[in-house]
Amino acid sequence: MYKRQVGNHVCTTDGFKLYSRWTPKTFNLKYNAFRPNDSAGAVTAGTVGNLPTPNPQVLKFGVESSISLTAPTLTGYTFSGWSETYGGAKVYDKGQTLSASTVSRMYKDCNGGTYNIYTTWTANKYKIHFDKNATDANGSMADMDMVYDVAKNLSENKFSREGYTFQGWNTAKNGSGTSYDLSLIHISEPTRLRRI
């Protein structure tokens, strides 16, 4: 075969093959903060922190990728993962691999624009321990299980003390802390209540 270079052109006396070149299209994966509702239906207070960076994350059509390893934070809750809908169930874990087919499906679902995913949470659980707060008091009480953002009535007092009337509960042994009766209570950490 005879080949001769003429400027930017190649002249040959025989045919030759050219191969197409392709570059995958890109789109954005956006990490969105979602705050759940509490037991009364109100949006949970607080700010979702520690969202992944960069945000959005750039993905390429048909190219394997992964969800960020970053775990967002929200007071009273533990990060569970990411949902594909606002307020929906978890679909992706932090750091989860996204297969090439999953990335392609995301691209198609958002028409090559921005694919949104949302934080999901598990409410933290705590215990209330009841202390009879006197060596001569009688009776026993089981710990009370609590869930963040869920109010519950305190258990009925089961302690007794000869010559004394039960006045309620307090977080401090000497009664100088926060006082509670049998009304609804919210807690955000393990709590010891002492009989007063």
Image (cartoon, rainbow, N blue to C red):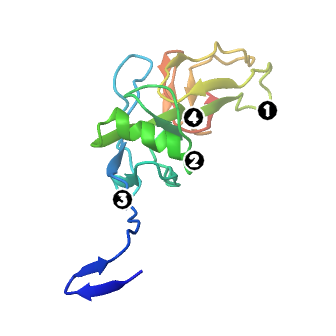
Label 3: how many residues lie within 10 Å, few (<14), some (14-19) or many (20+)?
Answer: few
Q: Mark 3 points at which residue?
A: 23
Rounded to the nearest angstrom, the CA distance separating label 1 from label 4 is 33 Å
Identify the secondary structure beneath mark 3: loop
First of labels 1, 4 by sequence position: 4
In front of the other: label 1 or label 2? 2
Quadrant where the C terminus is found in the figure: top right
User: Which numbered mark, 3 or 2, is in the foreground of this view?
Assistant: 3
Measured in 3D between alpha carbons, the distance from the residue under mark 3 to the one under mark 2, in whole angstroms, is 25 Å
Residue at left offset 44%, top offset 36%:
105
In whole angstroms, how far apart are the C-alphas of marks 4 and 2?
23 Å
Residue located at (41% from left, 28% from top): 36
Mark 4 secondary-structure assignment: loop
* First-in-chain label (4 vs 2): 2
User: What x and y, as percent, mark residue 187?
Assistant: 52, 32
Q: In this view, does 166 lie above or below 171?
A: above
Amino acid under disc 4:
Asn
The Cα–Cα distance between marks 3 and 4, rounded to whole angstroms, is 46 Å
Closest to the camera, between mark 3 and mark 4, is 3
**Numbered mark located on residue 135 in the image:** 1
